[in-house]
Image (cartoon, rainbow, N blue to C red):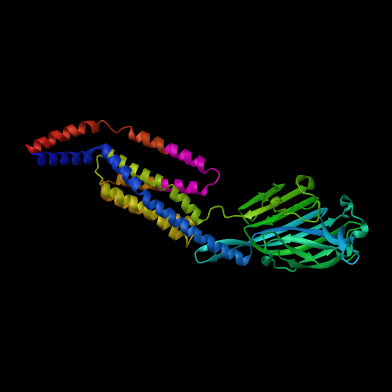
Amino acid sequence: MEIHQTEKNSKKLAAWFKSSISAKFIITGILTLLLMIPLSLIQDLIAEREVRQKSVVSELNDKWGNEILLYGPILKVPYKTYQETVVFNETTQETEKKQTTQLKYAYFFPKTLDINTDVKTTAKKRNNFETTVFTADIATSGSFEIPDFSLKSIANEDIVWDKATLEIKTTNLKGLKSEVKLNLNGNSYSFETKANGNSELDALESSYLALEDVPNTTTRSFDFKLTYNGSKSIRFVPIGKVTNVQMTSDWKHPKHTGSFITQSKRTTENGGFEANWKLLHTNRSFSQQYFKVLPNLNQYAFGTDFIIPLNEYQQSERAVKYGFLVIGLTFLVFFLIQTLSKISIHPFQYLMIGIALIMFYTLLISISEHSSFFKAYLIAGIAVIVMITLYSKSILKNWKFTLLIGSSLSALYSFIFVIIQMESYALLVGSIGLFIILGIVMYVSRKIDWDFDSAQPTHLESQLTTENS
């Protein structure tokens, strides 16, 4: 009797799960949560491929040229200092005062500094990975005023004018593609590299200036040009009393960064940009001249980052983040159709549909590595929508519901693609879209008779009792 009663209860429970709306809803929810496991594995795959991409891009950039930070020229003038020391003379057995001379350096920044930069970008590709590098032509001009040693009470005879030089501080020396020559007061000076071998900037230093070129009696003007191969960014430090920087480029996605904002900027006819900065010495918190040691001024740098707003892996990652929404809403559509039309859909069929939705992301990642993200999204989307739509026809036996599934998936994937492409308005558009979807679901689900669950077990029990009799 106990075995017979247990068997009867099992049949009753199985029948209830088969016909109960709540049971179907619970099973659908469990399947949705289970499908989050392969979805998280896909996110790990994207992260792995993105790390590989960054490694390849870093290698390409390193061979072409890295980030550029530049400031100069800086007038470097040596001066003498004197120090008295007391020494003991063993011969006379008396102490004597001895004066030693030390050579130190004073650094003076330009009075005016004008920098014009023209940047041409180029795409570099290795296997499936691509990066953007650039060639920058930098033309610099300005003037030095007479150095003021009075702040340190340094006598004029202690200033070693004939040993004065010019320095240009910079990074990415291997990206430098032109000979560095500076014109000062009509004469040309070549520069030699002074590599630091640490985190500080390297320096380009000129040979000793001719006495007639040193600005010790009057203002001297200068100009020089540099051609750089670089990547990621170009930045300058405003060391002039008045610093004017103009930058033009064909790059369509600039990000102007640093301690100072642009004075003006505009988009050019070719889709690139033109940006201008104008800074005074009162806008910054460092001096116009230094004695003994030149500080690290990197923190005051400004310029432009040449960024790729969203690469294929970043867009794929954003698409996967909406995976729960895609699976959940797709299952919800099938659940509503099943509930309203009384068509039976087996959990295994839900699982097959869920796996097809997961396959969309693997197709997206693999195809986007060989093509653009738009083409990959289009191909993967059409493939999955067609597969699920045809599969739905065999389940639902009705073209009306089948077309509803196909159109719902098309609208959902289109909506997510629009959100992925947006940056500033992604949250706003996504929130509005989800609100509309919620309204549609609420409107459709209002016809569901949720009381069916409470009455169903009694009906099934009577039916089973009749069958057992």
Occupied quadrant, residue 140: bottom right
Choose between 109 and 357: the one closer to the eye.
109
Q: Is residue 46 above or below residue 23?
A: below
In the rendered image, is residue 352 in sight? Answer: yes
Residue lying farthest to the left in this orientation: 469
Which quarter shows the C terminus? Answer: top left
Identify the residue at image location x=41%, y=46%: 412
Identify the residue at image location x=33%, y=32%: 446
SS assignment for the magenta stretch, majority: helix
Identify the residue at image location x=79%, y=48%: 281
Occupied quadrant, residue 220: bottom right
Occupied quadrant, residue 271: bottom right
Residue 339: image x %, image y %? 28, 38
32 within the magenta span: no
Magenta segment boundaries in residue numbering: 410-436
Q: Is residue 175 above or below residue 265?
A: below
Choose between 402 and 103: the one closer to the eye.
103
Choose between 199 and 397: the one closer to the eye.
199
Residue lying farthest to the front in this orientation: 93
Relative to 197, is 359 on the left or the right? left
Residue 120: image x %, image y %? 65, 61
Which quarter shows the N terminus? Answer: top left
Q: Is residue 273 above or below residue 454?
A: below
421 within the magenta span: yes
Relative to 150, is 51 on the left or the right? left
Q: How many numbered discs?
A: 0
Identify the residue at image location x=15%, y=34%: 461
Choose between 418 and 180: the one closer to the eye.
180
In the rendered image, is residue 213 in sight? Answer: no
Residue 367: image x %, image y %? 44, 60
